[in-house]
Image (spheres, rainbow, N blue to C red):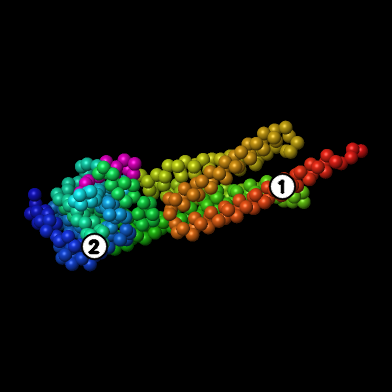
Amino acid sequence: MAPLQITLIFSLLFLPLSLSSTCTSPKLTSTYKSCSQLPSLSSSLHFTYNPSNKSLAVAFTAVPPSSSGWVAWGINPISTGMAGTQALVAFRNSDGSMSVDTFNLSSYSDIIPGKISFPVYEKRAVFNKDDGSITIFASVGHSGSGKINHVWQVGPGVTKGFPMKHDFKPENLKATATLDLSADGGGASQASESSTSSDATAKKRNTHGILNAISWGLLFPIGAMIARYVRTIESADPVWFYIHVGCQISGYAIGVAGWATGLQLGSKSVGIVYTSHRYIGIALFALATLQIFALFLRPKKEHKSRFYWNIYHHGVGYAIIILGIINVFKGLHILEPEKKWKSTYVSILVVLGCITVLLEIFTWIVYLRRKSNRSTKPYA
């Protein structure tokens, strides 16, 4: 083992237990050459890199969501995301002792504990009872260039030595950066650049959510309400039809934009898959596309096929409305925005529901009156 590696290991072993999750810890800053205050999860990384033997000594500090939670830091040699990361995961055991295990994160659904792709000369963890933070100390070998992609994360707990699923809040999804090993202090600037990129991704996620909420979650239900209830007003024919078509086509156009944004997000988030949200989105796009093309095949009122076309059109339309609202709520669960956004959408749905009930009553009253008038009208 190289002399520098031996020195690094001994420095790790004799660091005190009182540590900080910022770059102001005197003991850490005196032991490591560089420190990066990471852009998310209130975490920091102290590190020393030796280019002669390409060894990297790190002290990663973060606060898990709970006292039984875990923290992780790793290097991704193949991309800037989570999939492919070679990680060190630390957590407290039931007896209060600390464990540090290595995990190969080949994909989000395929997390393999065991040996990782680069050597780990030393690893240990320390729990700070003052602020609840955990610090991972490690000395690793790295054969790459002056810049590496590193990833960090925190999770709620551990089950049988296996880390439980972490949150997917914006701060969790922003926990990745490029670390510059070629110059002291470079890590901070690289982390800032990564933070800017992550902010752009967060904005795109919000745009995706807003577009789909407006299209599938609002315009399609409103368009269906116009078709069902405004048409009962005789003077509104055929104006109601053009309003209905305009509303549905606008919803479809906005929905396609939201769907395309979702595809972009998926291509940049390899390994992170929201299966049900994705499949419902695909089904919505397919059904809405069929619904739009069905307009060009709409038979005239007196045609014998009009009855079957109406059944198809109404069935597909109601399916789009139901699936759209379900997927909006799934999207809100994924994005986890401020509570007011979900409350606002729920309030809008409640208002639309109340209007629907009132219009349904009005429609039946009109229908029964017309039927009564026709039955009492004397024959010529």
The percent position of residue 360, horizontal first and vertical second, equals 68, 47
Say whether residue 16 is left or right of residue 355: left
Name which residue lies at 38% across and 54% down.
169
Q: Is residue 6 placed above or below 380 in the rendered structure?
A: below
Name which residue lies at 60% across and 55% down.
351
Q: Which residue is mark 2?
A: 130
Q: Is residue 263 visible?
A: yes
**Amino acid type, label 2:** Asp
Of callouts 2 and 1, the N-terminal one: 2
Mark 2 secondary-structure assignment: loop
Q: Which residue is mark 1?
A: 363
The percent position of residue 164, horizontal first and vertical second, equals 31, 46
Q: Nearer the viewer, residue 143 or 207?
A: 207
Mark 1 secondary-structure assignment: helix
Q: Nearer the viewer, residue 146 or 285?
A: 285
Say whether residue 118 is left or right of residue 265: left
Q: Quadrant of residue 298?
A: top right
- The secondary structure that most of the magenta stretch takes on is strand
Q: Which residues are magenta?
A: 99-112
Q: Nearer the viewer, residue 90 or 274?
A: 90
Question: Was residue 104 drawn as part of the magenta stretch in this picture?
Answer: yes
For the residues labelled 2 and 1, say whether their Cβ atoms are less than 8 Å apart.
no
